[in-house]
Image (cartoon, helix red, strand yellow):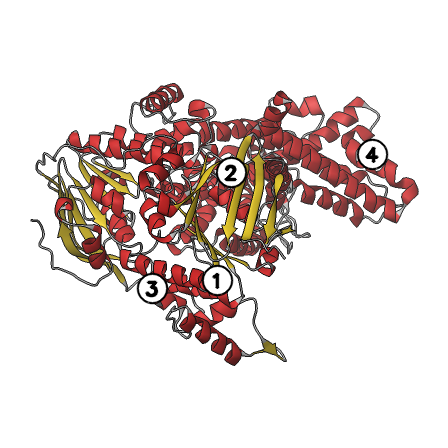
Amino acid sequence: MKDNKSMLKNEGFQSVFAALICIIAGLLVGYIVLAIINPAEATEAMLDIIRNFANYPRTSAKMKYLGNTLVKVAPLLMCALSVNFCYKTGLFNIGAAGQYVVGAAASLYGALAWHMPWYVCILMAMAAGIIWGALVGLLKAYGNVNEVISGIMLNWIALYLTNMLLGTVSEAATPYTTQIKSVNTDALIPDLGLRSLFINRYVTLAIPFSVIIAVAVWVVLTKTKFGYELCATGFNRNAAKYSGMNEKRNVIMSLMIGGALAAVGASFLYLSGYEQWQTTQSAVPAMGFNGIAATFLGGLNPIGTIFASYFIQHITSGGAYLDTNIYPSQIADLITAIIIYLCGFVLFFKHLMNTKRASKGGNN
Amino acid sequence: MGETPYAIEMLGITKRFSGITANDDITLQLKKGEIHALLGENGAGKSTLMSILFGLYQPDEGIIKKDGKEVKVIDPNAADRLGIGMVHQHFQLVECFTVLENIVLGVETTKHGFLQQKEARKKIMELSDRYGLMIDPDARISDITVGMQQRTEILKMLYRDSDVLIFDEPTAVLTPQEIEELIKILKNLAAEGKSILFISHKLNEIMEVADRCSVIRRGKYIGTVDIDATTPEELSRMMCGHDVKLSVDKEPAKTGEVILEVAGLSVHGKKKGKEKVRNVSFNVRAGEIVCIAGIDGNGQTELVYGLTGLTPVSGGKISLCGEDITHASVRKRSEKMSHIPEDRHKHGLVLDYSLEYNMVLQRYFEPQFVSGAGFLKKKVIREYAERLINTYDVRSGEGAQTTVRSMSGGNQQKAIIAREIDRGPKLLVAVQPTRGLDVGAIENIHKQLVAERDRGTAVLLVSLELEEVMNLSDRILVMYEGEIVGEFDPKKTDNEELGMYMSGAKRNTVEADR
């Protein structure tokens, strides 16, 4: 009994448990939607989504499509880390989406217009993200402008600026940016044999990089003086001020680093050659927003976020295997959206667990 | 009919929270028309008991009777219907509404959706006259004194025809003169047949106002005594379980050089334009405790913010050990200044951090705790925290790793005091260091402050408790409306005189030093 209680109290256990509840609830609601549309095929359809790349019988095909999922896990993880990092300083970085967009713009422009090698392109993305994050941070620190409001506005500014900028490097006949491999293969992130392992030319070092960065973020937040200050600022801004921390600087620094993480995430995707930027798109890419879900599903822990990002991308990619003869093609997006939406409820479930314990008998 | 003499009976009330029995078989019988004091230390279970009576908690065992009939108080609305009213320690008033609007709030008379305030006004004025409350129904809450706000709360209960009135530590926010007035009002109310429950831990007030007194200690019912047949010493013994020394032993101060020198200091409040501290000058020397006394909200908070650097000052000069720190950063100041903040949750602690992290909150950046590369030396931090925990007897569930949020208020405060004193400051600014703590903890903290003084630290104490002011200080400065209106020697003054200055009835011009 006592062991059971202390386990329930354990922060890490709670996070994992709440995440599992969210995943199950998300899958369940998704299943119900499928069942309403077509009860006979619902189970098979759900399994198709969950199987994702495992839908293919051959190992080589499985590897290839696992690779496709992983290619998109890297940017998602980076966006999630961006949100996570800022959240520790008490900031809700919804602007990660826009920072992601300027990262795409800078890295693609560097690759296509200036013919820079991949590492310079990544650094350019990083610089763009830092600037975009700093804008939010400066407004917050000196004007007390809510970071959500300025973040959302900057997302749209970023989108249309990027469309304009990348319009200069798009293919003549389509609104898509020129393929990197056709002009500047140096700008593609190297793979060190990962390509042949996955039989997938988009699988690059970006994937292990993103995991290493997640661990680095964890180290910075939990082991360093900088992380100590950031988290103290996030938990209690007044106490940070009382102890002489420069909370304004911490807010700006935190958003700059958050911006860098999201922007580098974009370069990880676009410098793999997997996607081209569509210069006529009128919606901010969902990657930044999905990063929010991944962060919460990961229990606001950079290590947990690695797994959460994979899960969310796994479901998103799995949506493509829905049989569009039975279900309308939008349903895949709907189902994954429902699951991702419910992933954001981790904190809610944790809160529920804690209050349940308290009401069972706990003095506040 | 054999009518019961009791308005309220709480019989055998037991309330448990996980592992803790907050109320253990407590019986409280309130006679009609009496003033009944409920006495106990902080954390003794007074609030829990009153929350049960007011319907905020349900008792695990025991019953509540109103006028001899058993009742269930399922929520505060039920308490309201039963005629049980409560004046909370923190008033529940809408600042930008008038007295009248606050009183009718929730029970407004309306006609076709429009407020009908004529009748309400008539009833309120009648009640006000009858009980001598002297309120102005059209004044805004934000413009009236705390005493008047409290009387508004009282009228709120009377307007709802409550006949059982609960007062939760009603004197904590009042001046001595206002307290006297309140006591008159309470006696008046009782004479008119209202039954009053008076929660307090101040013995002299209870002796003055109450007819009977029930004492609880650590959740247990100790007994009920007639005030006429008891003494403060006996009540104190019942409350604490042992004899408590109510005064602090201390040698005469051996003052040294001037440590803190404040000249013509002005500080703005939150709203720009309004100066909350005006042209304040004083000194604090090494080895003395200087106390700033005053009613809450007379600029003490802003003065401390200005001194510690939390708010920029708008005029004047602050020197610490001869060095001008008027515009220095918080961190620069904290090299020689320790600060026990007024609000330990707002400023003093990062509640979600562990105890060890909080112990180094003011010095985590020192080379002993952080490596050149910016990594925290967790082992050193742990050892340091454990030393403080042992030296200052900070108790917690899991030692250095306990999340501070889960610790008791007294131990949180001990942790702050340990952290601040251990830095060996030249100046210690302590703001209401004993607020909300029980008698044992207060004694301990008072001893530590005196020990700091004897070590040669300059101590600036800001306190709202006159008893604490009189006991601890070597010099008293009274603050009223942002100015220092008097300086006193605690041996040559009394509560009465201080009260006159605290309420603004009297004032002197004070020179920069004696």
Say which residue appears at 27% left-offset and 39% top-offset. Answer: B339
Comparing B406 with A362, the one in front is A362
Residue behind mark 4 = A47
Q: Chain letter of disc 1?
A: B
* Residue at 47% over, 48% down: A132
Could you confirm whether marks 3 and 2 are on the same chain? no
Q: Position of residue A69 (x, y in %)?
A: 70, 33
Disc 2 designates what residue? A261
Q: Residue at x 52, y 44 (%)?
A: B28
**Gap between marks 3 and 2, in whole Å?**
54 Å
Name of the residue lying farthest toward the right: A40
- Answer with mark 1 or mark 3, whichever residue precedes in sequence: 3
Label 3 close to label 2 by CB (< 8 Å): no
Quarter of the image with the N terminus of chain B in it: bottom right
- In this rendering, would B467 be left or right of B507? right
Between disc 3 and disc 4, the foreground one is 3
Q: Amino acid at mark 2?
A: Leu
Q: Nearer the viewer, mark 1 or mark 4?
A: 1
Residue type for callout 3: Thr
Please tell me the numbered disc located at residue B193.
Answer: 1
Instruction: Give the side of residue A334 with respect to residue B248, left or right.
Output: right
Circle 4: is it few (<14), some (14-19), or many (20+) Cα within 10 Å?
Answer: some
* Secondary structure type for disc 4: helix
Q: Are marks 3 and 4 on the same chain?
A: no
Question: Please, what is the three-letter code of the amino acid marked with disc 1?
Answer: Gly
